[in-house]
Image (tube, helix red, strand yellow):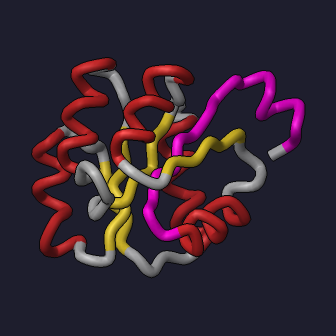
């Protein structure tokens, strides 16, 4: 995605994961997007409230507050929030996250093309 397009669209992604290695990988994979990062649930809620990103990609297992609770709290702030869960245990936690209000779940490990396809699906639904 070109820099001008990204800035013109004014779409931001909040990425939340306690594993800084995963955050680094996501930072590289999504380098064409305007991203902000959090490492725990409380920070995610704070950043969501402050920046109102277009999309949230969030690990379910987080310190201080799990991704399911964070999803519920973000949706209290903004019922239209688009939250995608990120987990190595989709079979175990995916359904709970969707019930909490997430729009999709990505299973770790994932490929860049899979991630980009899902991100584009929700950032540019037209």
Residue that appears at 75% across and 55% down = 31
Residue that appears at 45% across and 50% down = 57
Where's residue 71, x and y in %? 26, 40
Tell me where residue 103 sits by quadrant: top left
Task: Establish if 125 lies above or below 17.
Answer: above
Q: Nearer the viewer, residue 88 or 3?
A: 88
Where's residue 106, x and y in %? 37, 64
Q: Nearer the viewer, residue 105 or 24?
A: 24
Residue that appears at 12% across and 59% down = 95
Say whether residue 85 is magenta.
no
Task: Establish if 40 lies above or below 10.
Answer: below
Residue 33 falls left or right of residue 42: right
Residue that appears at 44% across and 29% down = 46
Residue 100 falls left or right of residue 43: left
Say whether residue 18 is magenta.
yes
Where's residue 102, x and y in %? 26, 44
The span picked out in magenta is 2-19
Tell me where residue 112 sits by quadrant: bottom right
Task: Establish if 124 lies above or below 117.
Answer: above
């Amino acid at each position: 995605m070109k820099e001008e397009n990204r800035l013109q669209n004014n779409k931001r992604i909040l990425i939340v994961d306690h594993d800084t290695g995963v955050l680094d990988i996501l930072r590289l994979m999504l380098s064409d997007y305007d991203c902000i990062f959090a490492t725990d649930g409380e920070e995610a809620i704070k950043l969501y409230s402050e920046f109102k990103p277009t999309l949230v990609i969030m690990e379910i297992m987080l310190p201080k507050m799990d991704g399911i609770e964070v999803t519920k709290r973000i949706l209290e702030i903004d019922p239209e929030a688009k939250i995608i869960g990120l987990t190595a245990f989709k079979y175990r936690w995916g359904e709970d996250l969707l019930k909490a209000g997430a729009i999709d779940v990505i299973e770790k490990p994932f490929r860049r093309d899979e991630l980009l396809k899902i991100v584009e699906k929700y950032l540019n639904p037209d």
